[in-house]
Amino acid sequence: MVGFNYKKAVSSLAFFAQKERGVINKMKAFKLIWLSDRLHLRQYGRPILNDVYFALPKGPVPSSTKDLADDSNYLVESEKELRDQVLENVGRYNVAVKNDFPKNVFSESDLKVMELVYENFGNLDEFTLSELSHQYPEWQKFETSLQIGHSSRFEMSYSDFFGNNNNAHPLFDQDDELLELNKEVFLENQIISNLV
């Protein structure tokens, strides 16, 4: 599988900011991106961004996308250049889209999933989305360790995104056979990418 796609990450932040009239709370954006990656993985066997996710007390966070949203010092020149062209921070907690962003980086299924996620979750604020994320198995796996304080964050595994939860939103109610097939595709692609 190909590594992290910073162009898709910048464009995802811009996509969701545009949906929010140009400015979005960063935590809300991270949760919408996580939900999009989760759904796309379950339906198509690959995440959209291929970012590394961490479980934090307020839920899953795509780490490299967070660096882009925060305009971190960790950004390489090409990442910073695109980020500065498309996004700007509005205070500490918000990011705004300031120019058109490259939509051609997304596949048809990427856009379809992000639209679906926004239709179903875009009306929720960042705190509600944070609470909602605590219902999913990929975060629950680390809940006790986070509460005890073993660490402030834990790296998550995409294979856990295939887990089901009785309280999950109907959007994540995939057919068991399809879910298993997409998990196999994902795991095979991971093996191949590790060989390259």
Image: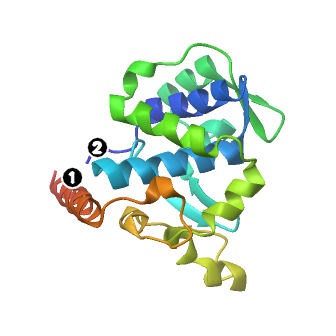
Q: Residues within 10 Å of mark 2 (few under 14, many from 20)?
A: few
List x then y, in percent, for residue 55. Answer: 58, 66
Q: Which residue is mark 2?
A: 2
Pick whichever, 187 or 132, lies toward us. 132
Horizontally, is 183 left or right of 48 in the view? left
Q: Residues within 10 Å of mark 1 (few under 14, many from 20)?
A: few
Residue at position x 44%, y 70% from top?
164
Residue at position x 34%, y 45% from top?
3
- Choose top left, top right, bottom left or bottom right for residue 195: bottom left
The kind of secondary structure element at disc 2 is: loop
Pick whichever, 28 or 112, lies toward us. 112
Q: Amino acid at mark 2?
A: Val
Q: Are marks 2 and 1 in contact (CB under 8 Å)?
A: yes
Q: CA distance from mark 2 to mark 1?
A: 7 Å
Horizontally, is 130 left or right of 105 in the view? right
Residue at position x 59%, y 37% from top?
68
Q: Which mark is residue 110?
A: none
The kind of secondary structure element at disc 1 is: helix
Q: Which residue is mark 1?
A: 193
In this picture, is 121 found above or below 115? below
Q: Amino acid at mark 1?
A: Ser
Pick whichever, 63 or 119, lies toward us. 119
In this picture, is 192 found above or below 167? above
